[in-house]
Every structure is written in C-alpha cells, then in structure tokens.
Image (cartoon, helix red, strand yellow):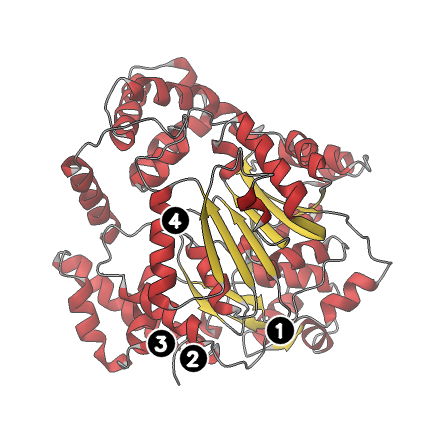
Amino acid sequence: MIADQTKQREQEGRNEAVSTTNTNWGGGYVTDIEYIEGFYAQQSPTHLSLSCLLRGVTVPMPGPDDPVSYLELGCGHGVGALILAASNPAWRVTAIDYNPAHIASARAMAAAAGVGNISFLEADLGSLAGSAAARAVPEADFTSLHGVWTWVAPEVRQGIVRLLAEKVRPGGVVHVSYNALPAWQGMLGMQRLILEAGRRGGWRSDARTAAGLGFARELNEAGAHYLQTSPLAQHLLTATKDQAAEYVTHEYMNEHWAPAFHADVAAAMAGAKLDWVSTASLLESFPQLMLTEPQRELYERHDDPAMRELVMDTCVQRQFRHDVYVRGARRMLAGERDTHLSALSVTPIVAPSEMDTSLSVPAGKAEMGPGLQWIIADALQGPATIGELLSRQPGVSNPAELTAILVSTGQAQPVLRPAAEQAPAASRLNRLLGGRVRSMLGQSGAAGLASSQLGTGLVAPRLIQFIAGRLLAGEREDNSAHWTAELSRDLDDTAREELATLIRTAIERRVPVLRRLGIVPP
C-alpha cells in the first residue's frame, strides 16, 4: 500500500516538474536529472578485502587505526563516501563526480555533518588524469566505480583507466560494477528504442524516459516480436513502473549506455596493471552453489579465470557484476586463507528472530543443513570470530563458505573495531540522514548508517534511518505513535496501520542491533 502511494506521488512530481534549458554539456550523459542517493556495501574496503581473501589473494583487512586512502569515481551525491569517512576518522576519502549539482549536494552534507576527512572534486573523468587536480588526489588503497563503466563514453572509460594507473597504489584494490553481458543482451534493442523514442518525446531527461518507456509498452501491447520474445524486456517493462524516475532515467537515457563482457572490462583494466581477482558478490565465489554439476564440470575444465567467468556468466543470469581488481595480486599459500578467515571477527546485524536458513541461488531457494543452521543461530547471539563459531559445531568446517553465507544473507558483517565507541562525525551524519526522512512516500535508493565498529555502513532502510535520527536527537522508543503520525501524513488509513506495524517491529528487532553497534545511545 505504501509502495502504491509512493508511485503515485512520484508521478505527480514528474508532472509538476518545470523544464529547464538543456545545454547538452553532459556529452550524452544525463546531467539535468540528479541520480538517486545510495549506500552499497560492495564498495566498502572491509567487504572488498573479504572478497579477495575468499579467493586466496592477499589484501589485508584495514586495521582499526590504519590511515586508509579511499577514492570513489562517479560518487553521485556522495552518501556512500560520506558514510565511510564518518565511520573511519583516520581515513582520507576523495570522491569525484562530473555533475556539479551532485558535488554541491555532497559538500553541503559533509559541512552540515562536520565530516572533515573527505574531499569532493568536480571533474571530467575522461580528462582528469595528468592534470594538476589529479596530482592533488592521494594515491588510493581502495577505489570504487559503481555503475559508471556502463554509462560513460569510450573516451571517458579510457580516461578512467589512465587515472587508475596514476592513482592506485601497488597492492591497491579497485571495485568496478557494470551491466554484464550476455545477460543484458536481450535489452540492447529495448534501451535503444527507449532512447530514440524518448528523444522525440520531451525536453527534460525524465520526460524523455517516460515517453520512451510509454512507447515501448505500446509496442509490446501491439505484439512487437522482439519485446514479446525477450524475457528480460518483459520483466523490465513491468519493473520500471515501480522504480525511481531518477534511476530509470540514468539507466536508459545515457547515449553511450553499453553493457560489457567481463573479459573486455578485464582487458581494459590491464592497462592500469590491474588483475581481476574476485567478485564482490560473495556467493559467486562458490561454483558449487551457483552451478549445476554438469555446468561445474565445464567450468572447472578451464584454469583461465576469464574463461571460467564467461562460463559462469553464460550459465547464470548475472545482469550486474561487481568485479574486484588488485594492482599486483599476491596469492596466499595453501591453508593461509582459512587461517585469516578463522581470525575474522563478525557481528550480527539482525535480531535472532530474523534468522534466515535459506540461500537464494540460481536454481532457487536452498535450505541450509542442520549444522549450518545451528551455527547461524549461534552467530546471531553476538560478536565472535569465524574460528570460534566453527569450534562450537564440529560438523561445519569450511570457514570461507560460512563467512560468505553470513555476509551474503545480510545476517552478519565483519567488525573492524569490536566494542569501539561511535565517532562523533558518524553520529552527526546519522542524525542528518535520519532527519532528512520526512515521509515514507517518494523514498528511493539504497540507504545506510555510519558505524565505527563496522568500519563501514550498516545497510538500513529509510525507516531505520529515521528512527536512528530520532533516537540520536534524544527521543525514546515510546514516542513511536508520534513517529507514525509524522511519517503518515500523506498515507491513507490502511497504509498508516501498515506503517505503525513496521515501526513497532523495527523497535523490537532493529533498535537493539543499533544499540549494540553503538549507532544509537544505550
């Protein structure tokens, strides 16, 4: 019900939008509509280190006080970079974006929250390398490009590689996410259709997107063979009705939109001496979970990682890849990986009552065995090392698989600083993020909260952001009736009751987690 009213409100907002002059300074990239805000766990250095560790590549997890240098290319509004900076005051974070509106927004948030260890730079990634501005950017231990590779022109991708060659330290890690082929093959024609029809249907990019999608849906209803025979096109024609206009516009209206094969991205990254080592989607590192036995036999026939990944991408509908590269990958000795994993501290991020013993794999839902179920239940009782959890249940002996399952199912995260007090900047940022949630309508994008204990963000829906902000402002949980009233001004009675239930559930299950992590006061 809330989702239905959100969709209606977003449409009304688009109808009321005032057109502005489009000077086309974006060079085919959408610039007149700002992108959605978001926090994505795969961009975190702790997550990237873990991704490498699972593949037996030496990338030490950042220490509690290590002066990490982090670089994000295409940062948008900078929320993810701000969360990392606020969670880790000793880090130096640099975030770059082409859109001045994004940079202005990011700088305003950093100033309002008093996050001083972050710098935002407005720059063209196609020409930044070799410039005075680039020389001022610190060499990076960790770098992330989330989605940028798919949306920019070839010359910008070349400029990105040149910048990575200049700025990534030996041993540094780079995260690159993008729309992947062959899974997106069925969308090539639909994206072009939306783009061309949209160009003739409006001035602002969001109006063009609505016109392009509307025309594609009309063609589909008219029985257009390509659309009718593409399962992905059919899925997305439906899914885009409920997605934020800002996301859909940036996804489909960039002129240089280009999904890519893993091997082609890896070949480009080689120009910066970057070796592909892993995927940040942790379960994808386990072919026994992702592939059938006949598929796995064909996968394992090849030693070449590029060929193995092509087999995986051909067998699995992997529409979006999170690739992890290292500049000078060092392989661990036999047994060394499991020793490091056994010493890894993890902490639960959901309540014990929310325990999930199923895995979403390409074949569907897989139920965990009794021994693994017991150990998941044990892990949700409080912080522990992977080795401690394994020692309590002798029937489970694979630290890599256990770690990947705990993290991938969103039930636990590595903890960088167990029992550490929350950094003041992290509390200020969380209060700011929570204070910006005014309604349950019109909320889009992935949300998070800064955590000094985790050394990264905690994935948190907007409602949890709101509650954290109110608790940080000195309010108590017994004020939940007022919270419901405040957030439900735009809702009907049914949706208001649904929201009240969601708030009560969040207070019962998630607030104790926030307190244990030090995100909100005891």
Relative image position of residue 27 (x, y in whole percent): 41, 26
Alpha-carbon span between mark 2 and mark 1: 23 Å
* Lower position in the chain sequence, tag 3 or tag 4: 4
Element assignment for label 1: loop
Q: Residue 162 occupies which quadrant of the picture?
A: top right
Element assignment for label 3: helix
Alpha-carbon span between mark 2 and mark 3: 12 Å
- Mark 4 neighbour density, 10 Å: few (under 14) some (14–19) many (20 or more): many
Mark 2: which amino acid?
A: Arg
User: Who's the residue at 32% across and 66% down the image?
Assistant: 432
* Mark carried by residue 65: 1
Element assignment for label 4: helix
* Mark carried by residue 515: 2
* Lower position in the chain sequence, tag 1 or tag 3: 1
Alpha-carbon span between mark 2 and mark 4: 32 Å
Q: Residue 466 occupies which quadrant of the picture?
A: bottom left
Alpha-carbon span between mark 3 and mark 4: 37 Å
Alpha-carbon span between mark 1 and mark 3: 33 Å
Q: Relative to residue 313, is residue 196 drawn left or right?
A: left
User: Who's the residue at 22% across and 61% down the image?
Assistant: 438
Circle 3 is placed at which residue position?
A: 508
Mark 1: which amino acid?
A: Asp
- Seen in the picture, residue 320 relative to 231 is either above or below; the reply is below
Mark 4: which amino acid?
A: Ile
- Seen in the picture, residue 44 relative to 388 is either above or below; the reply is above
User: Who's the residue at 35% across and 30% down the image?
Assistant: 237
Residues at discs 2 and 1 in contact (Cβ within 8 Å): no
Circle 4 is placed at which residue position?
A: 103
